Image (tube, rainbow, N blue to C red):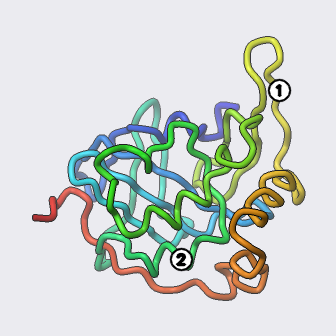
């Protein structure tokens, strides 16, 4: 599994951006029901910002233990808005720590829509997610603990239970396949997460 990035390795990690190191921050790939990453969410502890960045092949690199690099140069960045969050509400992310429930994010306009994308909120049997090294997609989901722990390759239908519970809670129209990011990528204006908003 050394060629994969576990969600644990992306939680409260230090990030390198344009040769500068920042953190702690957490990185959460947002993926569709086929497992393909469409957007990456970055949450920051220092500024309490939530950033939503369209995934591309060179966005993320993992260079050894605890060293994660983001290529963000040449873009304008702003804290995620409620509208930004609505555009990714049909995707999924994996956060067993419920980072968006931490005090620093209380009142953030994007949070109510983003919470509904967290797999453990609908199916607690999954305990781990593994992504390829570029975060292009989720490859495996881990379930159970201790001797009962097992890995399952991610496939269409892996989230059937979570999807059904989410539709029951939020309704069908929000999660239409026609809204997927490939067809409707949206535009993101994000601000550097190391700049504290006053």
Above or below, 75 against 50 in this view is below
Quadrant of the image for the C terminus? bottom left
Residue 176, horizontal then vertical, whole percent: 77, 80
**Mark pair 2, 1: CA separation:** 33 Å
Residue 1, horizontal then vertical, whole percent: 70, 31
Q: Where does label 2 land, which residue?
A: 86
Residue 29, horizontal then vertical, whole percent: 57, 56
The residue under the point 51% across, 37% down is: 97
**Which of the two discs, 2 and 1, labels the residue nearer the N terminus?**
2
Q: Where does label 1 land, which residue?
A: 150
In the rendered view, does 96 fall on the left or right side of 106? right
Extreme residue toward the top, this view: 147
Residue 151 picture quarter: top right
Residue 167 picture quarter: bottom right
The residue under the point 39% across, 57% down is: 70
Query: CB atoms at circles 2 and 1 under 8 Å apart?
Result: no
In the rendered view, does 71 fall on the left or right side of 180? left
What is the secondary structure assignment of the residue under circle 2?
Answer: helix
The residue under the point 44% across, 62% down is: 111
Viewer-nearest of labels 2 and 1? 2
Above or below, 148 against 137 in this view is above
Residue 150 picture quarter: top right
Extreme residue toward the left, this view: 198
């Amino acid at each position: 599994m050394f060629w994969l990035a576990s969600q644990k390795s992306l939680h409260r990690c230090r990030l390198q951006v344009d040769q500068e190191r920042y953190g702690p921050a957490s990185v959460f790939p947002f993926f569709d029901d086929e497992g393909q990453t469409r957007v990456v969410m970055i949450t920051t502890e220092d500024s309490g910002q939530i950033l939503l960045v369209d995934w591309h092949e060179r966005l993320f690199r993992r260079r050894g233990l605890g060293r994660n690099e983001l290529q963000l140069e040449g873009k304008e960045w702003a804290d995620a808005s409620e509208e930004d969050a609505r555009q990714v509400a049909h995707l999924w992310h994996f956060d067993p720590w419920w980072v968006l429930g931490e005090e620093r994010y209380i009142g953030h306009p994007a949070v109510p829509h983003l919470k509904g994308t967290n797999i453990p909120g609908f199916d607690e049997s999954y305990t781990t997610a593994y992504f390829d090294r570029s975060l292009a997609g989720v490859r495996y989901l881990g379930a159970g603990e201790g001797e009962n722990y097992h890995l399952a390759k991610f496939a269409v239908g892996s989230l059937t239970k979570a999807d059904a519970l989410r539709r029951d809670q939020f309704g069908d129209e929000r999660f239409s396949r026609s809204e997927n990011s490939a067809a409707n990528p949206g535009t993101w204006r994000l601000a550097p997460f190391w700049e504290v908003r006053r």
